[in-house]
Every structure is written in structure tokens, then in C-alpha cells.
Amino acid sequence: MTATTETRPLPAPAKETAARWRRQLSDPAVGIWLAALGVTLLGWLVVALDGGEFLTQPNITGILQNCVALGLIALGQTMVILTGSLDLSVAFLASLGTLVAADTMAGEDANLVVGVLAVLALCTAVGLANGLIVTKLKVNAFIATLGVALILRGWIEDNYTGPSGAVSPSFQRLGYDRIGPIPVSVFLLAAVALALWFVCRRTRLGHHMFATGGDEHAARLSGVRTERTVVIAHVLCALCVGIAALFLTARFGAGSPWAGTEASYDLESIAAVVLGGTILAGGRGGVVGTLGGVVVLAVLDSVFNQLAVDPFFKNVLRGVVIIAAVAVYARRRRSTRRSA
């Protein structure tokens, strides 16, 4: 007499639950936040083995603080990349924004509103110029925004040789005030992220951005005004850079010609967007994944600083992490297409 084993199929509800979990885990946004958790735990372990302390309140506050400026710029970069475009002028625009804010405020609270409006007006103009050059003059976004970046650089180097102006005393609280261990500026980042998430997921403009980035020709045939969508995306990106510039001004207390370029916000923001699962060609991605990418980069920076890693080797490690993440995404997309 032989014993036989039967493999009972999963009931339909169990199959649906398993399929739903597989879909959620294959989402790049979920993956990057799980990666952020893993990097944090690994960083805590490595720093502890080195004799240091990683998950302390000052260090966590510092990591959150470091997420703000990069997070704001990366959120803006996400908007343009979703439409299949790109913005390389963000670093110099952030630098110029700090200078305009500090010069306009001139250390007086009475000039605070004028200073904020001046920065946002400047950034709107630059974003509009970027969008019109890309859509009307048909210049590749890489070349167009690189050209605008060089123009901004020339203006800064011709008019500034060092820090300039002074931020108003009440505005400087944006850079340093905290609610418990959480910096106030993190709430600003969260508010901007929530607003852009709503635009992307709940508005017609957001659907048009995904459609334009996915297939511009098909989107145009479907009635989407693709050129206007790209222009608006560039303006949104520049406004995010303006908000980041205001935050940086509050942190520094003055305008800095190197505020954006020393931190390499142009390349760092693109790296955060790509880490978050947004495709450079456009059409897929979102702000949730980008925030996860920003957290991963901020945690890595904190770990490297605590371990006193050589700056050159630090960049090598960051490059390896970005390449590995993109390779994983590419392999996952190929697997998904084969199984479809």
C-alpha cells in the first residue's frame, strides 16, 4: 500500500491575498522604503561595531534635517522626469535663490514676505524659461537646462564672491526650530510632498504628466496638451527649488553662492529620483519613492560621516548603491514583461 500526498490548491481569497502582497512588494516605492529600513539597521550595526552610537536623538534629527533641502529639490525633479524631461539648473538656481532671499530680507522681519515672494518669482521665471526652451525651441532638456545653469552660474560669479545679505531673525527659526526631535522644516517637506502626491494621483494634470512621459505622441493624439504639461512640470520643479533655497537661507543666515553646487543638488536629486523607482524616460514613478531615495542617501551620508569614510570612497560607495538599485529595477521590469 503506497501513501499518496495531494497538494491542495489555495482557496481563491488566499490566492488573491498572495497576489496582492506580491504586487505591493514589487512596487519600487515599497522596495526603496524597505531598503531605507535595511540601510538604517545595517548602519546602526556597523557604527555600533565601530564603537559609536547611531540611533541617537541628535543623529536622527540631523538625518531628518539633511533630508529637507535634497528632498524638496528631488520632489521637483520628480515632476519633470515624470514627463520625460530633466532639470540640471536646480543647483545654481538654489544658490541664486539664497542670495536673492538674503539680500531682499536684509536682516529685517519687515522684508520677510517680499524676500519670499522675490525668490518664488525668480524660480517661476527660470522654470518657465526652461519649459519654453524645451517645448518651443525643441532643445533637448539636458542641453537646455545645462545652458540655463551656465547662465545662472555666470550671473552668480560676476556679482558675488562670498556670502551676501542676512536673513530676518524670525525666518531663521525655519532652519533650527524643532517639535520634539523633529525639525519644523520636515513638516514643510511633508506638506510639499503631500501636495505633489495629490497633483500626481488625483488631478488631471498629474494624469497628463504620466501620459506625456509614457508616450508623448500617443498622449498628444489623445488630446493631452503635452507642451503645456512639460512647461508646468518645469515651473513646479523650480518652485520646489525656491522653497529649498528659502530653507537653506534660514539655515545659513545669509545667501551663499555655493549653497546648491557644493551639495551637488543637480546630480543628487536625480540620484534620489532614480533610487525611488522613477524611470528616467518618464511615465512611471512618484513622490513616495523619491522620498525613500532621499532617506537612503541621507542615512548613508550619516553612516559615512560617523565612520569618517574618505570622501572619494564615500562617492564610490554611493555610486555602487545607485547602480545596484537601478540594475534591480531593470531586472524586475524585464521579469514583469516576460510574465505578462
Image (spheres, rainbow, N blue to C red):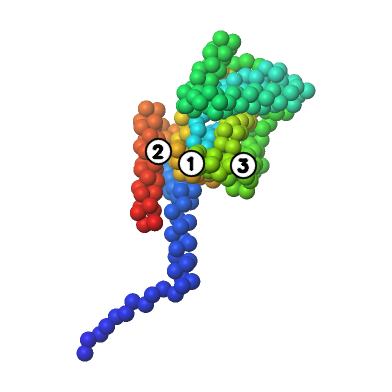
338 sits left or right of 36 in the view: left
In the displayed structure, does residue 129 sit left or right of residue 23?
Answer: right
Outermost residue, left side: 1
Q: The C terminus is located in which quarter?
A: bottom left
Which mark is nearer the camera, 1 or 2? 1
With 178 as the anchor, is 318 left or right in this view?
A: left
Query: Which residue is denoted by mark 1 in the rendering?
Result: 215
**Residue 288 picture location, percent across and down:** 54, 46
Spatial distance from mark 3 to mark 1, Cα to Cα? 15 Å
Q: Which of the two residues, 234 or 318, is positioned nearer the viewer here?
A: 234
Q: Is residue 112 left or right of residue 14?
A: right
Q: Nearer the viewer, residue 80 or 293?
A: 80
Q: Please name the residue shown 46% across and 72% down the image.
A: 12
Viewer-nearest of discs 2 and 3? 3
Which residue carries the number 2 mark? 322
| Residue furthest right as drawn | 110
Dot label at residue 205? 3
Query: Mark 3 or 1, which is nearer the eye?
Result: 1
User: For mark 2, does the 10 Å Cα neighbourhood hold few (<14), some (14 to 19), or many (20 or more) residues?
Assistant: some
Residue drawn at the location 29% of the way across and 80% of the way down:
5
Q: Amino acid at mark 3?
A: Leu
Of labels 2 and 3, earlier in sequence is 3
